Amino acid sequence: MAKYLLRRLNLFVATAIALALVMFYATSLFPVDHSVALSGVQSPTAEQLTVIKEEYALDSNPAVQFAAFLKQRLTGNLGVSITSQQSVADELVSVLPASFELANVAAFIAIFFGVPLGVLASMNQHKLTQHSIMAITLTGYSIPVFWLGLSLSLWFGVQLGWLPISGQINLLYEIEPVTGFMLIDTWISDSEFRMAAFYDALQHIILPAVTLAVLPFTVVVRITRSAMLNVMNQTYIRAAEARGLHTNIIILRHALPNALIPVLKHLGLMLGPFASYSIIVEVIFSWPGVGSWLVSGIYQRDYTVIQGGIMAVALLIMFSSILIEVLHTATNPISRKELYAAS
């Protein structure tokens, strides 16, 4: 297992270096002075220009420049925002928790509702029920996320007035950020209006989280159903049935844990589309996360923000994919057997 983890770590490092190389080349193509694209400092003084040239080795050959660029990015120096003249790293840190909170709530909704529906679709003998569930998942998978987000905003936010359609919390509440997760910060706040603020934050996250959860929800239902149909035909399940175990016990203790293994693997493969969908959802609902921050940087031609946002999203996807792959290998006996055989 140690060799396997080392190989995955090497894969992450190699992919991160390749990503940095692509970003370094793309930076040279920006329609702005190279020093400004790298540092974000517009109209730098002579002293600032000298420091920028030294930090990024602008007077050297491209190989040395890339090494200097990589060093600056690895040490957390992402430059300053061209529009706000604030540190890009600080801005990135301030918007990441909102994106994590939205993604976690959406993933929870997808798994909490998707797994039971997948099990129901696989175990129910009524063809109408099975076909209805699969039709719902196919429809949800086919609906464009931007249309779904706008439709939910129109129905539940504008026409019915049940839920807010923008932002993370009402501006009337002053909540001191502790964890960056608004639901947690409102819950642990010492304000006398903390429960009202918590419910308000919960209402704000419902529409964007449901919109973002539709795609993984449909995938979870379909993969769970397929895995359950496969597992229920295995020999050990038939042996458990022959012993007289109750169907619910067989499903919960024996079938479902094994059926969730391929679900975990497919969730890892979905991280890329999930991240792209989250960017669209954040823009639609004005959610203050990485997606809306990155799109705002693109509109304003803030090249350092574009670099920082793309690198952060890409690195998170790569790290999460490798982490899920490691968890899948650790929880799957067949994968471990193949791993040890290969070693």
Image (cartoon, rainbow, N blue to C red):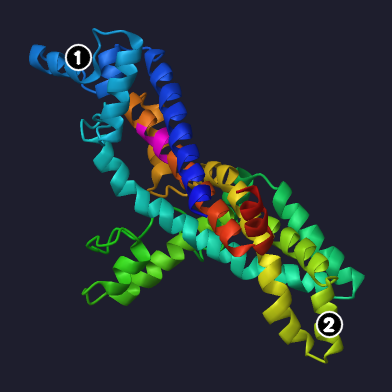
Spatial separation of the CA atoms under disc 1 and disc 2: 72 Å
Under tag 2, what secondary structure? helix
Residue tagged 1: 53
Determine the residue positioned at 74% across, 58% down: 137
Residue tagged 2: 239
The answer to whether one can see residue 295 in this image is no
Q: Left or right: 247 with respect to 9?
A: right
Residue type at mark 1: give it.
Lys
Determine the residue positioned at 45% across, 66% down: 203
Disc 1 vs disc 2: Cβ atoms closer than 8 Å?
no
Tell me which corner region of the image, top left, top right, bottom left or bottom right, holds residue 295. top left
Q: Which mark is residue 37?
A: none
Q: Is residue 136 magenta?
A: no
Viewer-proximal residue among 308 and 253 = 253
Compared to residue 208, the image places residue 194 above or below, namely below
The answer to whether one can see residue 247 in this image is yes
Compared to residue 240, the image places residue 47 above or below, namely above
Give percent across and percent down for residue 338: 67, 53
Under tag 1, what secondary structure? helix
Magenta-highlighted residues: 308-312
Viewer-proximal residue among 248 and 198 = 248
